[in-house]
Amino acid sequence: RKSLQSADAAGIRMMTFDSVEELIKMKKFHSNPEIILRIAIDDPTAKYQLGKKFGCDPEKVAPQLLQDAINLGMNVVGIA
């Protein structure tokens, strides 16, 4: 909450999300976020497997999260 409010006050608009809970927090605590859906990609050659910790499933979860963001009136500007 505090991080979102600080980002808003500093003029930081662009941020990522990978859950509906994050969307709700952004909607509540940031005045005008530009949001990017973060998807999980499996890369067996990566030194660190961040896809297991960050991002949502691109096929099973991403479509619903995009719809949730639209329903909340949020400004989705990309997918990463």
Image (spheres, rainbow, N blue to C red):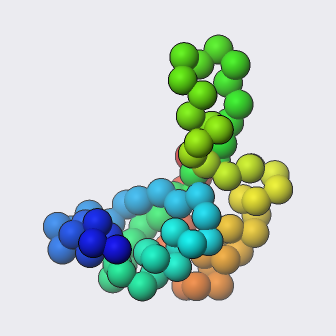
**In the figure, residue 78 lies in which quadrant?**
bottom right
Left or right for 5, reference 9: right
User: Between 32 and 41, which is closer to the camera in this rendering?
Assistant: 41
User: Between 17 and 79, which is closer to the camera in this rendering?
Assistant: 17
User: Between 62 and 6, which is closer to the camera in this rendering?
Assistant: 6
Q: Quadrant of the N terminus?
A: bottom left
Say above or below: 40 vs 26. above
Task: Name the residue rendered at 57%, 45% in the picture.
Answer: 54
Q: Residue furthest right?
A: 60
Task: Name the residue rendered at 71%, 31% in the picture.
Answer: 42
Left or right for 17, reference 64: left
Using the rendered image of the protein, determine whether residue 2 is visible from the camera's viewpoint.
yes
Using the rendered image of the protein, determine whether residue 8 is visible from the camera's viewpoint.
no
Left or right for 40, reference 36: right
Say above or below: 38 vs 71. above
Task: Name the residue rendered at 41%, 59% in the picture.
Answer: 15
Q: Position of residue 4 (x, y in %)?
A: 32, 70
Task: Name the residue rendered at 43%, 75% in the picture.
Answer: 26
